[in-house]
Image (cartoon, coloured by chain):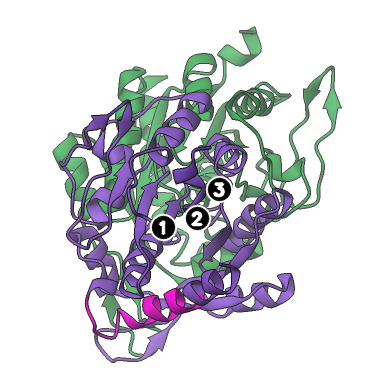
Chain colours: A green, B purple
Amino acid sequence: MTAERTQRRLIAIGSGKGGVGKSTLTANLAIALQKAGRKVGLVDADIYGPSQPVILGNQGQKPVARDEKLVPVESAFGIPVLSMGHLVEPGRALAWRGPMAGNALAQLVDAHWGDVDTLLVDLPPGTGDVQLTMLQRFKPVGAVLVSTPQDLALMDAARAGQLFDQAGVPVIGLVENMAGYVCPHCGEVSDPFGKGGVEKAAGRLELPFLGRIPLDLAIREGSDRGEPPASGDDAFAKPFHDIAAKVDAWIGARS
Amino acid sequence: MTAERTQRRLIAIGSGKGGVGKSTLTANLAIALQKAGRKVGLVDADIYGPSQPVILGNQGQKPVARDEKLVPVESAFGIPVLSMGHLVEPGRALAWRGPMAGNALAQLVDAHWGDVDTLLVDLPPGTGDVQLTMLQRFKPVGAVLVSTPQDLALMDAARAGQLFDQAGVPVIGLVENMAGYVCPHCGEVSDPFGKGGVEKAAGRLELPFLGRIPLDLAIREGSDRGEPPASGDDAFAKPFHDIAAKVDAWIGARS
């Protein structure tokens, strides 16, 4: 542990299950926290399925190494980021066993993060090597859990929560994603994945509920196009800024 | 390799990315292939996030061991299944490093599958230990890839495809999931995750396109409730039976 590293707080963004919007939340939370005055960096710890280079629109850039440590890649949103997606060519599978994945995480976290004070770690699905290496070597100050309202996703979120709990990492709160889809034809709202399940689960687990992000084409397309909604100031930015305000307050209360 | 095992074909269901409906497809494909006359078993290889006990409605049952091998658990749909979800209590995180996950897979595959001739393996996200152990120890005859039409999901599906390709496992085809959501208010169709991207990707990769499964509350609720749509005979069963017919023909052509 260097003096540099102990000044920097890690916040893990986890879900247990994949495909529930963890990477989208992480990128937008990073941007919103930065707008709130934090110096934020982002580690894409989804070694096998990195998506941050696409979401943050800096695919194709390569990090350089200095003194055997990586220098993070800049993004158009002022968020430096490190991702395996910057180190391997797109579409290439990393057929790596766990220890290599754990080492890769260490390289991404233990890098030249400069004046970054808050490092968000976008975790892969599961509770395996990457999660264990993070908990053992780079203990986060807190974790945000994201889930869709579907029972099957909540089950995996509970598993992820239990892992943080065992490691003594406080869960800052839960985020519900993909609730409330507005029909582009009639404007009525419906919920393909259900609604309210995450807020109920938060109550049951006695954890804070941080907010709800709608299922919306604009958010999905923004992620595919490298334009995270939180970088703008329209209606799709708001839920991310509201969640970031709660995370910011949580950090403030513990500093 | 025992004589018994060489008679049994493994088919892997993969996606690269989580949360795209891989487990739902696997359960329904198993039921549909069984209705088509195959003797089908199901291995839930998502060690960290097992969902088959919920989808197949046999949560809480425990497999017994005989001669140091597991005996699969029956389900109401005539599909024997083995899943870590049957071996650990719900909500409990398996904080396992890769070698343990790989060993767990071996225990699930190398079990008393009896007269099962076709074993579907529901893979976890990523291209790590479980995938590598499967490819090295229990080579599948073919793989089905499932993705949503979203660019970010397709990217991970391409990675999974590359892994099978490197291992000499033919990809039977691609399935598009979560396309075409019917608004419950006005009945009009829209596509929160886009549409057609998987069929286009199949064309680009010169792989067969097996079909499209709509985003529908009925399918999601059926999965959460342990009632897979393919077990019925309504409109939601059809896409699964159509896909199963193509997989069945593929198996037939190679036997």
Chain identity of mark 2: B
Cα–Cα gap, marks 2 and 1:
6 Å
Q: Position of residue A140 (x, y in %)?
A: 46, 23
SS of the residue under disc 1: loop
Which label sits in the foreground, 3 or 1? 1
Predominant SS of the magenta segment: helix
Please tell me whether residue B235 is drawn above or below residue B204 in the rendered image. Answer: below
Quadrant assignment for the C terminus of chain B: bottom right
- Residue B235 colored magenta? yes
The residue where tag 2 is placed is B9
Query: Based on the displayed image, in which of its 4 quarters is residue B46 positioned?
Result: top left
Residue at x 24% of width, y 74% of height:
B218
Mark 2, secondary structure of its residue:
strand
Q: Quick check: B215 left or right of B159?
A: left
Distance Cα–Cα, label 3 vs label 1:
45 Å
Q: Amino acid at mark 1?
A: Asp
Q: Amino acid at mark 3?
A: Ala
User: Residue at the spot x=78%, y=30% of the render?
Assistant: A71
Q: Which residue is mark 3?
A: A27
Residue B90, placed above or below residue B79:
above
The answer, for residue A174, to whether it is visible in the render is no
Q: Which mark is residue B174?
A: none
Mark 3, secondary structure of its residue: helix
Q: Over which residues does the magenta segment extend?
A: B232-246
In space, the residues marked 2 and 3 are separated at their CA atoms by 42 Å
